[in-house]
Amino acid sequence: MTSDIGAAGASRILQAAQQQQKPGTFKIKTDGAANLRRTIDQLESEAGRKQIIGSALLRLRGIQEGIIPPGAEWETVGGFLQATGQPFTIGLDERGQIAVQAQSESDLLNFTPRQQEAIREATTQMKDLVKGADFEDTKRGLRAELAFGILRIEEMKAYSPPEEFWEKQFSSYAEMGRPVKLALDGEGNKIALDQLTHDFSDVEDLGDRRKLLNAMSDLKDIISGDKGATEIWHFAALGNRVDGSDYFLDLDDAGDVVVQRNKITTVTPDFLDADANNPEVTAPWQEEALRLYGEGKSFQFGFEADGQTLKVIENNVLNLTRDDEIAAGQGRIRDALVSLLA
């Protein structure tokens, strides 16, 4: 069974070999010791590089999550590229400083002209993919905002006192018997929409908007006593008004006026529905790149062993540090020790 010899272990063997030898024992050759020392120094340098890259990746993750602000230029550039889903490389320059470069701005000299073209095309496609993913994330966030609002409405019905401004408005409108709907303003904040003063400008179809405006006018007249209830939705609105339940005016699929309760299925507009085909993924690398982007991780483009198939390489310590060279360095230490002890 062969044991791995690390830099520290090899260094101790070397120091012991260089000490005063007892009579009858071998004496290590000076040039061989120097070669071994250089091998050890190189291995330790690679290990230090690995630690620096690992720390850099942790800082970028902290910047991505808003835990720490970017300081150095590479942090600002890397944080921006990671947050926007752009592929980039990260490593150490000739001075041993951390360097970050977007592949869209790189000369890509390590790749063939055909590979360079494929990477640039993939980088362009990523912009549309990220835009689609961000749009779906935004819709998901808005749906969650409405869902939380519905939860608060149910809690307030169970005698949990209103706290936020919209909650107080909603409770007040409901208690007065006014049609009130949970909605979102232009900035995605929850609001209580009093339909008796609403212009229904959020309804794009002009015919549907006119129906709701007429229904609002009818409801005002019914509440004031200037008009009697004659339609089903009239009685539904009055029934909710009497018992203090929340309700609002809406249109069904046939375009007829109906009375709805505030539920996640009734207050969520159609344009917030999830689209499983957005963004549309047509290649494995796109799926992997979107996965890493969704997890807040950075990546770069490369190629499979065939040199033709584009692949996504996650920017992590394993991929960014030359572990194969460290293993080769350990092998060189073994060879040097065998040579010295022979």
Image (cartoon, helix red, strand yellow):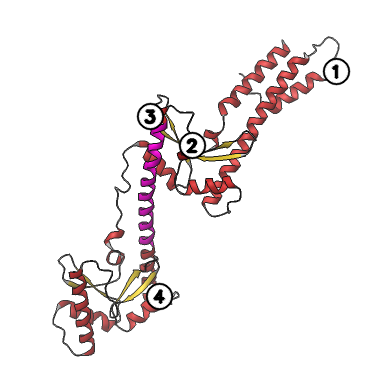
Mark 3 or 4, nearer chain start: 4
Q: Is residue 3 visible?
A: no
Mark 1 or 2, nearer chain start: 1
Q: CA separation, marks 4 and 2?
A: 52 Å
Residue that extends furthest to the bottom in the rendered view of this protein: 225
Picture quarter with the N terminus: top right
Instruction: Kindly state the secondary structure of the residue where label 3 is placed.
Output: loop
Instruction: Indicate whether residue 125 is drawn in magenta.
Output: yes
Q: Is residue 166 above or below residue 117?
A: below
Q: Amino acid at mark 1?
A: Gln
Where does the image place residue 85, in percent across and percent down from the top left?
Answer: 44, 46
| 80 on left or right of 4 | left
Frontmost residue, 244 versus 334? 334
Provide the residue designation for mark 3.
309
Where does the image place residue 215, in percent across and percent down from the top left?
Answer: 20, 78
Q: Which range of residues does the magenta coloring cover?
A: 116-144
Frontmost residue, 81 versus 47? 81
| 163 on left or right of 146 | right
Q: Callout 2: 10 Å neighbours few (<14), some, many (20+)?
A: few
Q: How many marks?
A: 4
Provide the residue designation for mark 4.
167
Q: CA separation, marks 1 and 3?
A: 59 Å
Secondary structure mainly formed by the magenta segment = helix
Tag 1–tag 2 contact (CB < 8 Å): no
Q: Amino acid at mark 4?
A: Glu
Instruction: Kindly state the secondary structure of the residue where label 2 is placed.
Output: loop
Q: Which mark is residue 20?
A: 1
